[in-house]
Image: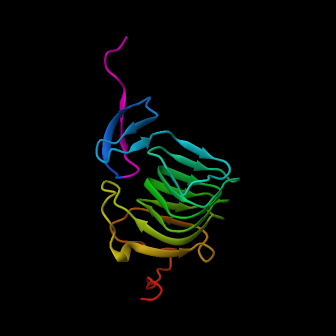
């Protein structure tokens, strides 16, 4: 019998604070914001009745899934349809059958051939997800015009295969 416990580092999906948790834990209370944090990986095959689906684990959205909500996770792989905001700590990957209509906030975005992304992508710093990017790093991407786009963390925003668009002012501004 071992006296040491296996632990892992998790990032709160509400306040983005780091915490050490036991490897077998399914949920914990965040020591920073005192909110319950789900640590499980999720696999979505249909719909979800809520307005927000958040976990500190990974999320797999199957091709049969149709979601109209905010999605928050560590690594998010999308094969179905999502209408809403998508936040990831590590990356978002939109598969060949995936469709995202809404903004994506992540350190890395991968859109595979056939995948559709309509909205803005905001690249977050991988080591400091609470930092915001500068406006020059925010791109508007219409995947129907550019079906295969890979956006990675680089020192300068790459425009290879992407046509940067000026940010539109909000209505009534």
Q: In this orientation, which residue lies closer to the viewer: 5 or 93?
A: 5
Residue 121, position as x, y percentages in the image = 46, 69
Q: Does the magenta run of residues contain 8?
A: yes
| Residue at the image point whose x is 68% and y is 53% from the top | 63
Residue 19, position as x, y percentages in the image = 31, 40
> Vertically, is 47 above or below 29?
below
**Number of residue marks:** 0
Task: Considering the whole magenta stretch, tell me its main secondary structure.
Answer: loop
Image coloring type: rainbow
Quadrant where the image shows the C terminus: bottom left
Q: Does the magenta run of residues contain 114?
A: no
Judge whether residue 139 can be spotted in this image: yes
Q: Is residue 173 left or right of residue 134?
A: right
> Vertically, is 152 above or below 169?
above
Residue 104, position as x, y percentages in the image = 48, 64
Quadrant where the image shows the N terminus: top left
Tell which residue pokes out farthest to the right in this image. 64
Q: Is residue 45 left or right of residue 4?
A: right
Residue 4, position as x, y percentages in the image = 31, 20
Q: Which residues are magenta?
A: 1-14
| Residue at the image point whose x is 36% and y is 76% from the top | 135
């Amino acid at each position: 019998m071992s006296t040491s416990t296996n632990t892992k580092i998790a990032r709160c999906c509400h306040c983005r604070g780091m915490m050490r948790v036991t490897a077998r834990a399914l949920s914990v209370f965040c020591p920073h914001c005192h909110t319950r944090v789900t640590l499980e990986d999720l696999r979505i095959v249909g719909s979800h009745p809520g307005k927000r689906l958040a976990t500190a684990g990974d999320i797999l959205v199957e091709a049969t899934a149709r979601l109209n909500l905010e999605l928050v996770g560590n690594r998010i792989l999308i094969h179905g349809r999502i209408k809403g905001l998508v936040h990831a700590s590590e990356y978002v990957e939109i598969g060949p059958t995936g469709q995202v209509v809404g903004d994506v906030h992540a350190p890395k975005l991968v859109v595979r051939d056939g995948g559709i992304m309509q909205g803005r992508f905001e690249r977050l710093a991988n080591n400091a997800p609470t930092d915001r990017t500068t406006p020059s790093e925010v791109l508007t991407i219409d995947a129907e015009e550019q079906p295969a786009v890979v956006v990675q963390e680089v020192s300068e925003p790459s425009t290879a295969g992407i046509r940067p668009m000026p940010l539109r002012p909000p209505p009534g501004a």
